[in-house]
Image: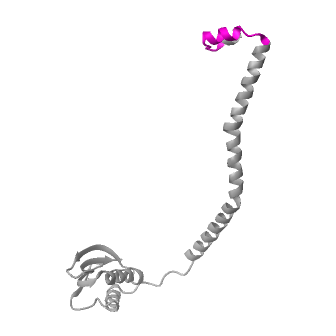
Amino acid sequence: MAALSERLVVPPRFARWWAAKTPNERRAIAAVGLLVAATLGWLVLWQPVQQDLAALRAAVPAERAALAEGERMAGEIAGLARATPLPPAPEPQAAIERILGERGLRGGTTQVDWREGRARIAIDATRFDTLVAALDALQRDARLRIVEATLTARVEPGTVRAELVVAR
């Protein structure tokens, strides 16, 4: 113990206590300490690791199924990407006129002005849901996207005045 206490910083009280023990007592104390350390290691490290491994092994079939589904979806997406391209977009002015007419927005209060690759559309009064449906059709069918929008609430509930700028 003298060689050990010279290399380690051991409190003097413990060093005196240890020195007072016989070699058999020291071996017994060391064995009990080793047993306590092994038990703590088993409880703190080994058991949680084994429980985690069991949980991971139980989850493997579900994870494999999810992976197979993801790979199937990736293949489907790749197939869709190789699909035929969309047909060319129609003439923007004609498409705007057609879509506004289909949605009932092409009245005397609607103005469409086409300049510099952009269409300025002013709709005096329309229901908001009708406007949203028309904008969706403009994007989907004519491939025109909103660049600017000003919506002003009207007195009638759910009705707006819309000033829009759309472009490709």
Left or right: where 89 falls relative to 54: left
Q: Quadrant of residue 158?
A: bottom left
Q: Is residue 15 magenta?
A: yes
The x and y percentages for residue 166 are 31, 77
Q: Quadrant of residue 168?
A: bottom left
Look at 24% across and 91% down and name the residue there: 107
Residue sitting nearer the eye, 49 or 131:
49
Q: Is residue 129 magenta?
A: no
Q: Quadrant of residue 2?
A: top right
Left or right: where 111 falls relative to 98: left
Residue sitting nearer the eye, 79 or 118:
79
Left or right: where 23 falls relative to 6: right
Residue sitting nearer the eye, 121 or 28:
28
The x and y percentages for residue 91 are 36, 86
- In the image, residue 37 sits, relative to residue 71, either above or below, namely above
Residue sitting nearer the eye, 131 or 98:
131
Look at 69% across and 11% down and name the residue there: 18
- In the image, residue 68 sits, relative to residue 12, either above or below, namely below
- Counting every numbered tag in the picture gives 0
Q: Quadrant of the N terminus?
A: top right
**Of all residues shown, which one is farthest toward the right?**
24
The x and y percentages for residue 94 are 33, 89
Left or right: where 88 falls relative to 65: left
Span shown in magenta? 7-23
Look at 70% across and 42% down and name the residue there: 47
The x and y percentages for residue 89 are 41, 84
- In the image, residue 113 sits, relative to residue 60, either above or below, namely below
